[in-house]
Image (cartoon, grey):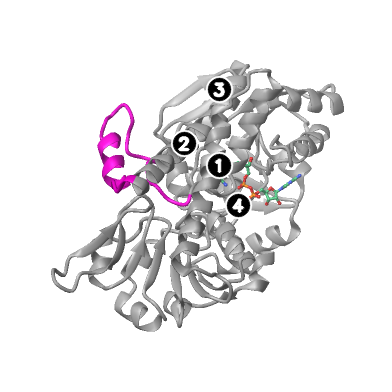
Amino acid sequence: MKIAIIGSGYVGLTTGACFAEVGHDVLCVDNDEAKVASLRAGKIPIYEPGLEEVVAKNVEAGRLRFTNDTPEGVSFADVIFIAVPTPPQPDGSVDLRFIERVAREIAPAIDSYKVVVDKSTVPVKTGEKVAETIRRYAPEADFDVVSNPEFLREGCAVEDLMKPDRIVIGANSDRAMALMQKIYEPFVAPVLVTDINSAELIKHAANSFLALKISYINAVSAICEASGADVEKVAEGIGTDKRIGRAFLNAGLGYGGSCFPKDIAAFIAISDDLGTPFDLLKEVQRINADQLDRFIKNIRDALWVLQDKRIAVWGLAFKPNTDDVRSSVAIHLVEKLVEEGANVRAYDPKAMDKARQLPVAEKITLVDSPLEAVEEADALVIATEWPEFASVNFKAVKESMLAPLVFDGRNLLDTKTMAKLGFQYRSIGRPIIQAVSAETQAPVAATAG
Ligand code: NAD
């Protein structure tokens, strides 16, 4: 099948590469000239495990190409995927100007039957608007609009696209559905066929439910801290119930990234707009914001004064295995520490280049290794759960720090091990390790007041 992807970012590029991998002919379009030039030169502008290899292999095979020219993409392809940003507006509703612009750009170039697929995350009824817009600018155009939301997770996007849990296709035309099924034939995954509105709604409802699970366990983590219970045990106890499931029950600093915060805000705005307010999601947002504030309060309580304290921060990406720092909680944490006058020395295995472009970068020191970050530090904060942080030499960390104080915002490390190593260690919803008892060599745990 001949496919064009409009928007070659995290979703568009990975989707295009994976379609090419299963044998389709793909033309990835982007209006960012530097991005297209870099892709043409074999440079991938994002870090995503396995992506570079899949792109290189399919470019070599001639199945994957890049262009700035949307009309070229439209006339080349039978099916045109839209994968442009859908950022939030200040009131939480979705800014659909990129989608609307693509619809206008596509319209005059439609020269035969085309399927226009919305892969971006959009409010319910956007498909109708896209169809209306194309019709307005090209009344004679022969096309159908389809919704095919994307569920990939950054950090394992290639795997998620090659082996999805399910593929959701919302279409109101058999002709369009037949082409969509042909595209997805090589992928072994259940296909859920719906109307366009339901497909659009599935994406926002799914992300909101995942965020709800995160906020639920984070609210439980606060109760654990106040009562001396261990949130990991509680999560295991409830997560082994098949009706609940263990996934997304990891207590931490809360959700961030380019999707969850904006999608939850969008679903609230959409439901308000439809006259069916979804206030439960406002509580999800409140708990998420509180979680970071509570963590910073814990750091403040331990250090007394943050002004001029040297704080090492491990992790800047919004989650491990990605270089994406958009709406990263780790970055919000750094900003708040800087606001309070702390001297932050930060390290991330993959997100340094992206972090360097943020305004906060000028106010912190970005270093080249976890050990460099902790030199003469008053405290270490783990903000992203990169697995490699768990295997750093903690004896060396302790020797390097001014005081052995660790705040683990992602429950990455083992409490007993940290106690044995002599750290004062505070994580999320788990016992606080104050020190090792000289008499018993047993960790001394204390509950928060
Ligand atoms: P991104 O910012 O990484 O990529 C979007 C690309 O679109 C950019 O390269 C931009 O230059 C390009 N673009 C913008 N307007 C254009 C136009 N008129 N013509 C051609 N190119 C244009 O965004 P992303 O993370 O890939 O997200 C895209 C959509 O997918 C959003 O709706 C997002 O919510 C959704 N989504 C993202 C993820 C994720 O994990 N990133 C997962 C599922 C769904």
Disc 4 target residue: 327
| Residue neighbourhood size for the residue with mark 4, other residues' Cα within 10 Å, grouped as few (<14), some (14–19), many (≥20) | some
Mark 1 CB within 8 Å of ligand 1: no
Kind of residue at disc 3: Ala
**Mark 4 touches mark 1? (CB < 8 Å):** no
Q: Is mark 2 within 8 Å of ligand 1?
A: no
SS class, disc 3: helix
**What is the C-alpha distance between the residues marked 4 and 1?**
9 Å
- Report if the CB atoms under discs 1 and 2 are less than 8 Å apart: yes
Nearest to the observer: residue 139 or residue 159: 159
Badge 3 local density, few (<14 within 10 Å), some, or many (20+)? few
Q: Position of residue 233 (x, y in %)?
A: 26, 44
Determine the image quadrant of residue 198.
top right
Q: Is residue 165 magenta?
A: no
Q: CA distance from mark 3 to mark 4?
A: 38 Å
* Residue that appears at 42% across and 47% down: 159
Give the residue pinned by disc 3: 178
Query: Along the polypeptide, which appears first: circle 1 or circle 3?
Result: 3
Q: Residues within 10 Å of mark 1 (few under 14, many from 20)?
A: some
x and y, in percent, of residue 437 in the image: 20, 69
SS category of the residue bearing label 1: helix
Tag 4's secondary structure? loop
Which numbered disc, 3 or 4, marks the residue that appears first in the sequence? 3
- Please indicate whether residue 327 sits to the left or right of residue 217 in the image: right
Q: Is residue 236 magenta?
A: yes
* Residue 393 seen in the figure: no
- Residue at which label 2 appears: 210
* Quadrant, the N terminus: top right
| Magenta-colored span | 227-253
- Real-space Cα distance between discs 1 and 3? 32 Å
Q: Say which mark, if any, is on residue 260.
A: 1
